[in-house]
Amino acid sequence: MSYFRSLMSLADGVAYFDNAAVAPLTTAAKQAILNWTEENASRGDAHWPQWRTQVEKTRKLAASLLNASREEVAFTHSTTEGINFVAEGFPWKEGDNVVIPTGEFPTNLFPWKMLARLGVELRQVPMPSNEVDLEKLASACDARTRLISCSWVGYSHGYRVDLNELCQVAHNAGAYLMLDAIQGLGVFPIDVQQTPIDFLSADGHKWMLGPEGAGLFYLRKEHLDLLRPMSVGWNSVATAGDFNSPCMDLRKAASRYEGGTYNMVGLMGMGASLQVMLDYGIEAINQDLRAVHQEIISRLQAQGAIIHSNASAEHWSGIISFDIPGKDPLSVKQAAAKQDIYFNTRNDHFRLSPHAYTTTEDIDRLMESLFAENV
Protein backbone atom coordinates (compact mmCIF):
# COMPACT_ATOMS: atom_id res chain seq x y z
CA MET A 1 0.00 0.00 0.00
CA SER A 2 2.75 2.46 0.91
CA TYR A 3 4.51 2.02 -2.45
CA PHE A 4 1.34 2.57 -4.45
CA ARG A 5 0.67 5.69 -2.35
CA SER A 6 4.04 7.02 -3.53
CA LEU A 7 2.68 6.95 -7.10
CA MET A 8 -0.06 9.43 -6.16
CA SER A 9 0.05 13.21 -5.64
CA LEU A 10 -2.51 13.53 -2.85
CA ALA A 11 -1.82 16.50 -0.61
CA ASP A 12 -0.39 15.84 2.83
CA GLY A 13 -3.17 15.20 5.31
CA VAL A 14 -5.76 14.10 2.75
CA ALA A 15 -7.50 10.80 3.41
CA TYR A 16 -9.52 9.96 0.30
CA PHE A 17 -12.31 7.38 0.22
CA ASP A 18 -14.38 8.53 -2.76
CA ASN A 19 -12.84 6.75 -5.75
CA ALA A 20 -16.28 5.47 -6.78
CA ALA A 21 -17.15 9.10 -7.60
CA VAL A 22 -14.04 10.80 -9.00
CA ALA A 23 -10.58 9.51 -8.12
CA PRO A 24 -7.39 11.55 -7.76
CA LEU A 25 -4.87 11.30 -10.58
CA THR A 26 -1.65 9.38 -10.40
CA THR A 27 1.45 11.55 -10.42
CA ALA A 28 2.23 10.19 -13.88
CA ALA A 29 -1.17 11.31 -15.19
CA LYS A 30 -0.75 14.73 -13.65
CA GLN A 31 2.64 15.14 -15.34
CA ALA A 32 1.36 13.90 -18.70
CA ILE A 33 -1.44 16.46 -18.59
CA LEU A 34 0.96 19.26 -17.64
CA ASN A 35 3.31 18.27 -20.46
CA TRP A 36 0.50 18.30 -23.03
CA THR A 37 -0.78 21.63 -21.73
CA GLU A 38 2.66 23.22 -22.06
CA GLU A 39 3.15 21.86 -25.58
CA ASN A 40 -0.26 23.02 -26.73
CA ALA A 41 -0.02 26.43 -25.10
CA SER A 42 3.47 27.13 -26.42
CA ARG A 43 3.37 25.57 -29.90
CA GLY A 44 -0.23 24.85 -30.84
CA ASP A 45 -0.51 21.61 -32.79
CA ALA A 46 3.20 21.29 -33.63
CA HIS A 47 3.36 18.08 -31.58
CA TRP A 48 0.07 16.64 -32.90
CA PRO A 49 1.71 13.62 -34.61
CA GLN A 50 3.34 12.66 -31.32
CA TRP A 51 0.03 13.11 -29.51
CA ARG A 52 -1.66 10.86 -32.04
CA THR A 53 1.01 8.24 -31.46
CA GLN A 54 0.34 8.49 -27.73
CA VAL A 55 -3.37 7.91 -28.34
CA GLU A 56 -2.54 4.57 -29.94
CA LYS A 57 -0.22 3.71 -27.07
CA THR A 58 -3.12 4.36 -24.71
CA ARG A 59 -5.32 2.13 -26.86
CA LYS A 60 -2.76 -0.65 -26.59
CA LEU A 61 -2.70 -0.27 -22.80
CA ALA A 62 -6.51 -0.32 -22.61
CA ALA A 63 -6.58 -3.46 -24.75
CA SER A 64 -4.00 -5.05 -22.47
CA LEU A 65 -6.15 -4.26 -19.43
CA LEU A 66 -8.96 -6.29 -21.03
CA ASN A 67 -6.79 -8.84 -22.85
CA ALA A 68 -8.49 -7.66 -26.02
CA SER A 69 -7.08 -6.65 -29.39
CA ARG A 70 -6.54 -2.96 -30.13
CA GLU A 71 -9.09 -3.25 -32.93
CA GLU A 72 -11.76 -4.04 -30.32
CA VAL A 73 -11.24 -0.83 -28.31
CA ALA A 74 -12.67 2.62 -29.00
CA PHE A 75 -12.20 5.74 -26.90
CA THR A 76 -15.18 7.57 -25.43
CA HIS A 77 -15.84 10.72 -23.46
CA SER A 78 -17.91 8.83 -20.87
CA THR A 79 -19.42 5.50 -19.92
CA THR A 80 -22.71 6.95 -21.15
CA GLU A 81 -21.33 7.41 -24.65
CA GLY A 82 -20.26 3.78 -24.90
CA ILE A 83 -23.62 2.49 -23.70
CA ASN A 84 -25.33 4.70 -26.25
CA PHE A 85 -23.15 3.24 -29.00
CA VAL A 86 -25.10 0.05 -28.34
CA ALA A 87 -28.50 1.51 -27.45
CA GLU A 88 -28.65 3.72 -30.54
CA GLY A 89 -26.65 1.55 -32.93
CA PHE A 90 -28.21 -1.88 -32.38
CA PRO A 91 -30.58 -3.20 -35.12
CA TRP A 92 -33.71 -3.18 -32.98
CA LYS A 93 -37.08 -4.44 -34.18
CA GLU A 94 -40.43 -3.54 -32.72
CA GLY A 95 -41.28 -6.05 -29.99
CA ASP A 96 -37.69 -6.61 -28.89
CA ASN A 97 -36.82 -6.18 -25.22
CA VAL A 98 -33.86 -5.24 -23.03
CA VAL A 99 -33.45 -6.69 -19.53
CA ILE A 100 -31.71 -4.86 -16.67
CA PRO A 101 -31.74 -5.24 -12.88
CA THR A 102 -33.38 -2.53 -10.80
CA GLY A 103 -31.05 -0.13 -9.01
CA GLU A 104 -28.83 0.62 -11.99
CA PHE A 105 -27.10 3.99 -12.30
CA PRO A 106 -29.05 6.30 -14.67
CA THR A 107 -26.37 5.79 -17.34
CA ASN A 108 -27.52 2.18 -17.62
CA LEU A 109 -31.21 3.04 -17.47
CA PHE A 110 -32.10 6.10 -19.53
CA PRO A 111 -30.58 4.97 -22.87
CA TRP A 112 -32.77 1.85 -22.76
CA LYS A 113 -35.86 3.86 -21.83
CA MET A 114 -35.30 5.96 -24.95
CA LEU A 115 -35.89 2.86 -27.08
CA ALA A 116 -39.63 2.94 -26.33
CA ARG A 117 -39.96 5.14 -29.42
CA LEU A 118 -38.87 2.11 -31.48
CA GLY A 119 -41.27 -0.26 -29.78
CA VAL A 120 -38.51 -1.83 -27.66
CA GLU A 121 -39.57 -2.84 -24.16
CA LEU A 122 -37.35 -2.23 -21.15
CA ARG A 123 -37.74 -4.89 -18.46
CA GLN A 124 -36.47 -3.78 -15.06
CA VAL A 125 -36.18 -6.85 -12.88
CA PRO A 126 -36.79 -6.34 -9.14
CA MET A 127 -33.79 -7.43 -7.10
CA PRO A 128 -33.16 -8.34 -3.47
CA SER A 129 -31.66 -5.55 -1.41
CA ASN A 130 -28.02 -4.80 -2.23
CA GLU A 131 -27.38 -7.61 -4.70
CA VAL A 132 -28.10 -8.92 -8.20
CA ASP A 133 -29.99 -12.20 -8.50
CA LEU A 134 -28.96 -13.71 -11.83
CA GLU A 135 -31.73 -16.32 -11.74
CA LYS A 136 -34.31 -13.55 -11.62
CA LEU A 137 -32.54 -11.83 -14.49
CA ALA A 138 -32.65 -15.04 -16.51
CA SER A 139 -36.35 -15.58 -15.73
CA ALA A 140 -37.20 -12.17 -17.19
CA CYS A 141 -35.78 -13.11 -20.61
CA ASP A 142 -37.76 -14.57 -23.48
CA ALA A 143 -37.37 -15.18 -27.20
CA ARG A 144 -37.51 -11.42 -27.91
CA THR A 145 -34.78 -10.47 -25.43
CA ARG A 146 -31.98 -9.05 -27.52
CA LEU A 147 -29.74 -7.70 -24.78
CA ILE A 148 -29.04 -7.81 -21.05
CA SER A 149 -27.32 -4.74 -19.60
CA CYS A 150 -25.85 -4.82 -16.11
CA SER A 151 -23.24 -3.11 -13.95
CA TRP A 152 -20.21 -5.15 -12.96
CA VAL A 153 -20.33 -3.47 -9.55
CA GLY A 154 -23.37 -1.71 -8.11
CA TYR A 155 -22.60 1.97 -7.60
CA SER A 156 -24.48 2.32 -4.30
CA HIS A 157 -24.07 -1.02 -2.53
CA GLY A 158 -20.92 -2.38 -4.22
CA TYR A 159 -22.22 -5.84 -5.11
CA ARG A 160 -19.97 -7.40 -7.79
CA VAL A 161 -21.57 -9.88 -10.17
CA ASP A 162 -19.78 -12.97 -11.43
CA LEU A 163 -19.01 -12.07 -15.04
CA ASN A 164 -18.83 -15.62 -16.31
CA GLU A 165 -22.24 -16.42 -14.86
CA LEU A 166 -23.65 -13.15 -16.20
CA CYS A 167 -22.39 -13.97 -19.69
CA GLN A 168 -23.94 -17.40 -19.44
CA VAL A 169 -27.32 -15.95 -18.49
CA ALA A 170 -27.28 -13.60 -21.48
CA HIS A 171 -26.05 -16.09 -24.02
CA ASN A 172 -28.33 -18.89 -22.82
CA ALA A 173 -31.19 -16.48 -23.54
CA GLY A 174 -29.84 -15.84 -27.03
CA ALA A 175 -29.06 -12.26 -26.03
CA TYR A 176 -25.99 -10.02 -26.03
CA LEU A 177 -24.39 -8.67 -22.86
CA MET A 178 -23.68 -4.97 -22.29
CA LEU A 179 -21.46 -4.43 -19.23
CA ASP A 180 -21.18 -1.12 -17.39
CA ALA A 181 -17.70 -1.73 -16.00
CA ILE A 182 -16.84 1.65 -14.52
CA GLN A 183 -16.97 0.54 -10.87
CA GLY A 184 -14.72 -2.49 -11.34
CA LEU A 185 -12.31 -1.87 -14.20
CA GLY A 186 -8.82 -1.17 -12.94
CA VAL A 187 -9.05 -3.00 -9.63
CA PHE A 188 -10.45 -6.36 -10.72
CA PRO A 189 -8.78 -8.51 -13.39
CA ILE A 190 -10.80 -9.15 -16.53
CA ASP A 191 -10.02 -11.28 -19.57
CA VAL A 192 -12.45 -10.96 -22.45
CA GLN A 193 -10.84 -13.95 -24.14
CA GLN A 194 -12.02 -16.12 -21.26
CA THR A 195 -15.17 -14.19 -20.35
CA PRO A 196 -17.18 -13.59 -23.54
CA ILE A 197 -18.59 -10.14 -22.84
CA ASP A 198 -20.11 -8.63 -25.98
CA PHE A 199 -19.93 -4.91 -25.14
CA LEU A 200 -18.27 -3.00 -22.30
CA SER A 201 -18.03 0.67 -21.39
CA ALA A 202 -16.15 2.54 -18.66
CA ASP A 203 -14.82 6.02 -18.10
CA GLY A 204 -11.34 6.32 -16.64
CA HIS A 205 -11.98 8.76 -13.80
CA LYS A 206 -12.78 6.26 -11.06
CA TRP A 207 -10.74 3.14 -10.36
CA MET A 208 -8.40 3.68 -13.34
CA LEU A 209 -7.22 6.94 -11.70
CA GLY A 210 -7.48 8.98 -14.88
CA PRO A 211 -9.15 12.31 -15.72
CA GLU A 212 -12.85 12.73 -16.41
CA GLY A 213 -13.92 12.68 -20.03
CA ALA A 214 -11.60 9.91 -21.23
CA GLY A 215 -12.89 6.35 -21.26
CA LEU A 216 -13.09 3.20 -23.33
CA PHE A 217 -15.61 1.08 -25.17
CA TYR A 218 -15.02 -2.56 -26.04
CA LEU A 219 -16.90 -4.78 -28.47
CA ARG A 220 -16.05 -8.25 -29.64
CA LYS A 221 -14.60 -8.06 -33.14
CA GLU A 222 -17.34 -10.29 -34.59
CA HIS A 223 -19.87 -7.59 -33.60
CA LEU A 224 -18.11 -4.79 -35.46
CA ASP A 225 -20.70 -4.51 -38.21
CA LEU A 226 -23.63 -5.18 -35.88
CA LEU A 227 -23.81 -1.63 -34.55
CA ARG A 228 -24.62 1.33 -36.76
CA PRO A 229 -22.13 4.10 -35.90
CA MET A 230 -24.23 6.79 -34.25
CA SER A 231 -21.79 9.61 -34.99
CA VAL A 232 -19.73 9.43 -38.17
CA GLY A 233 -16.97 11.92 -38.95
CA TRP A 234 -13.55 12.38 -40.48
CA ASN A 235 -11.99 10.01 -37.93
CA SER A 236 -14.40 7.14 -38.62
CA VAL A 237 -12.86 6.13 -41.92
CA ALA A 238 -9.78 4.25 -43.08
CA THR A 239 -8.56 7.38 -44.88
CA ALA A 240 -8.78 9.60 -41.78
CA GLY A 241 -6.62 12.65 -42.41
CA ASP A 242 -7.24 12.71 -46.15
CA PHE A 243 -9.88 15.41 -46.09
CA ASN A 244 -10.33 15.42 -49.88
CA SER A 245 -11.32 11.76 -50.13
CA PRO A 246 -15.06 11.27 -50.77
CA CYS A 247 -14.84 7.56 -49.91
CA MET A 248 -16.61 6.60 -46.69
CA ASP A 249 -14.73 3.37 -46.01
CA LEU A 250 -15.33 2.81 -42.30
CA ARG A 251 -12.37 1.64 -40.25
CA LYS A 252 -12.24 -2.12 -39.76
CA ALA A 253 -11.97 -1.56 -36.03
CA ALA A 254 -13.93 -0.22 -33.07
CA SER A 255 -12.27 3.15 -33.70
CA ARG A 256 -14.91 3.69 -36.41
CA TYR A 257 -17.21 4.73 -33.56
CA GLU A 258 -14.91 7.55 -32.42
CA GLY A 259 -16.11 9.92 -35.13
CA GLY A 260 -14.17 13.11 -34.56
CA THR A 261 -11.48 14.79 -32.53
CA TYR A 262 -9.89 13.00 -29.59
CA ASN A 263 -9.83 14.30 -26.05
CA MET A 264 -6.06 14.48 -26.39
CA VAL A 265 -5.25 15.75 -22.92
CA GLY A 266 -7.63 13.27 -21.29
CA LEU A 267 -6.17 10.33 -23.17
CA MET A 268 -2.65 11.43 -22.22
CA GLY A 269 -3.64 11.29 -18.57
CA MET A 270 -5.58 8.06 -18.92
CA GLY A 271 -2.67 6.37 -20.70
CA ALA A 272 -0.20 7.46 -18.05
CA SER A 273 -2.34 6.04 -15.24
CA LEU A 274 -2.98 2.80 -17.11
CA GLN A 275 0.76 2.37 -17.56
CA VAL A 276 1.30 2.84 -13.82
CA MET A 277 -1.42 0.35 -12.96
CA LEU A 278 -0.36 -2.29 -15.45
CA ASP A 279 3.27 -1.97 -14.34
CA TYR A 280 2.20 -2.47 -10.73
CA GLY A 281 -0.14 -5.30 -11.75
CA ILE A 282 -3.93 -5.45 -11.56
CA GLU A 283 -3.71 -8.61 -9.44
CA ALA A 284 -1.43 -6.77 -6.99
CA ILE A 285 -3.79 -3.78 -6.91
CA ASN A 286 -6.68 -6.16 -6.27
CA GLN A 287 -4.85 -7.83 -3.38
CA ASP A 288 -3.93 -4.47 -1.84
CA LEU A 289 -7.50 -3.22 -2.12
CA ARG A 290 -8.82 -6.45 -0.62
CA ALA A 291 -6.59 -5.96 2.43
CA VAL A 292 -7.83 -2.37 2.80
CA HIS A 293 -11.43 -3.48 2.36
CA GLN A 294 -11.14 -6.17 5.02
CA GLU A 295 -9.45 -3.83 7.49
CA ILE A 296 -12.18 -1.21 7.08
CA ILE A 297 -15.00 -3.77 7.38
CA SER A 298 -13.43 -5.26 10.50
CA ARG A 299 -13.01 -1.89 12.18
CA LEU A 300 -16.50 -0.73 11.26
CA GLN A 301 -18.05 -3.89 12.66
CA ALA A 302 -16.02 -3.57 15.87
CA GLN A 303 -17.62 -0.15 16.34
CA GLY A 304 -21.15 -1.45 15.77
CA ALA A 305 -21.67 -0.29 12.20
CA ILE A 306 -24.27 -2.10 10.08
CA ILE A 307 -22.66 -3.28 6.82
CA HIS A 308 -24.88 -3.43 3.74
CA SER A 309 -22.27 -4.48 1.18
CA ASN A 310 -21.50 -8.11 0.44
CA ALA A 311 -17.99 -8.74 1.75
CA SER A 312 -17.60 -12.30 0.47
CA ALA A 313 -14.68 -13.27 -1.74
CA GLU A 314 -17.04 -13.73 -4.70
CA HIS A 315 -18.91 -10.43 -4.52
CA TRP A 316 -16.88 -7.80 -2.63
CA SER A 317 -15.75 -4.64 -4.38
CA GLY A 318 -14.06 -1.35 -3.55
CA ILE A 319 -17.41 0.08 -2.40
CA ILE A 320 -18.55 -0.28 1.21
CA SER A 321 -22.09 0.76 2.12
CA PHE A 322 -23.03 0.92 5.81
CA ASP A 323 -24.91 2.71 8.59
CA ILE A 324 -23.82 3.86 12.01
CA PRO A 325 -26.74 3.81 14.46
CA GLY A 326 -27.55 7.32 15.59
CA LYS A 327 -25.37 8.99 12.93
CA ASP A 328 -26.60 11.01 9.95
CA PRO A 329 -24.37 10.13 6.97
CA LEU A 330 -24.55 13.56 5.33
CA SER A 331 -23.71 15.44 8.55
CA VAL A 332 -20.75 13.16 9.25
CA LYS A 333 -19.56 13.51 5.65
CA GLN A 334 -19.61 17.30 5.86
CA ALA A 335 -17.76 17.34 9.17
CA ALA A 336 -15.13 14.93 7.86
CA ALA A 337 -14.51 17.03 4.74
CA LYS A 338 -13.47 19.92 6.99
CA GLN A 339 -10.64 17.66 8.17
CA ASP A 340 -9.63 16.66 4.61
CA ILE A 341 -11.26 13.24 4.96
CA TYR A 342 -13.44 12.51 1.95
CA PHE A 343 -16.14 9.90 1.41
CA ASN A 344 -19.70 9.93 0.10
CA THR A 345 -23.27 8.89 0.74
CA ARG A 346 -25.73 7.00 -1.46
CA ASN A 347 -29.37 6.10 -0.73
CA ASP A 348 -29.05 7.64 2.76
CA HIS A 349 -26.17 5.29 3.67
CA PHE A 350 -22.47 5.94 4.15
CA ARG A 351 -20.43 4.94 1.08
CA LEU A 352 -16.68 4.42 1.29
CA SER A 353 -14.55 3.64 -1.74
CA PRO A 354 -10.85 3.29 -0.86
CA HIS A 355 -8.16 2.22 -3.33
CA ALA A 356 -4.90 0.31 -3.29
CA TYR A 357 -3.10 3.52 -2.29
CA THR A 358 -5.13 3.81 0.95
CA THR A 359 -2.94 3.52 4.05
CA THR A 360 -3.60 2.43 7.62
CA GLU A 361 -3.06 6.03 8.66
CA ASP A 362 -5.87 7.06 6.31
CA ILE A 363 -8.13 4.45 7.88
CA ASP A 364 -7.23 5.62 11.39
CA ARG A 365 -8.28 9.18 10.55
CA LEU A 366 -11.43 7.93 8.86
CA MET A 367 -12.51 5.98 11.93
CA GLU A 368 -11.89 8.96 14.18
CA SER A 369 -14.14 11.13 12.01
CA LEU A 370 -16.88 8.51 11.64
CA PHE A 371 -17.18 7.83 15.34
CA ALA A 372 -16.45 11.28 16.76
CA GLU A 373 -18.80 11.91 19.65
CA ASN A 374 -19.68 15.48 18.68
CA VAL A 375 -21.03 14.64 15.21
Image (cartoon, rainbow, N blue to C red):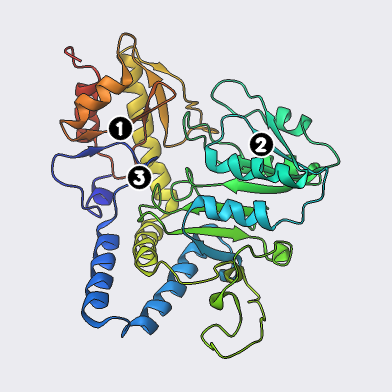
Q: Which residue is mark 3?
A: 22
Give the residue type at disc 1: Phe
Quadrant for the C terminus, please: top left
Residue 343 shows which numbered tag? 1
Cα distance in 3D space between marks 3 and 2 = 25 Å
Identify which residue is drawn at 51% across, 28% down.
312
Residue 59 visible to an observer of this rendering:
yes
Tag of residue 100? 2
**Mark before the other along the chain sequence, 3 or 1:** 3
Kindly indicate whether the residue at mark 1 contacts the one at mark 2 (C-beta within 8 angstroms): no
Q: Residues within 10 Å of mark 1 (few under 14, many from 20)?
A: many
Type of amino acid at the residue the image marks with label 2: Ile
Q: Residue furthest left?
A: 12
Q: Quadrant of residue 39?
A: bottom left
Residue 128 location, x and y as percent? 61, 21
Estimate the x, y position of residue 127 in percent, counting from the top left. Answer: 63, 24
Residue 141 vs 4, above or below: the answer is: above
Q: Measure the alpha-carbon separation of dots 3 and 1.
A: 11 Å
Between the C-alphas of marks 2 and 1, the distance is: 28 Å
Among the two numbered marks 2 and 1 on one chain, the one whose residue lies closer to the N terminus: 2
| Residue sticking out furthest to the bottom | 244
- Residue for point 72% across, 29% down: 135
Task: Name the residue at 46% across, 30% down.
Answer: 156
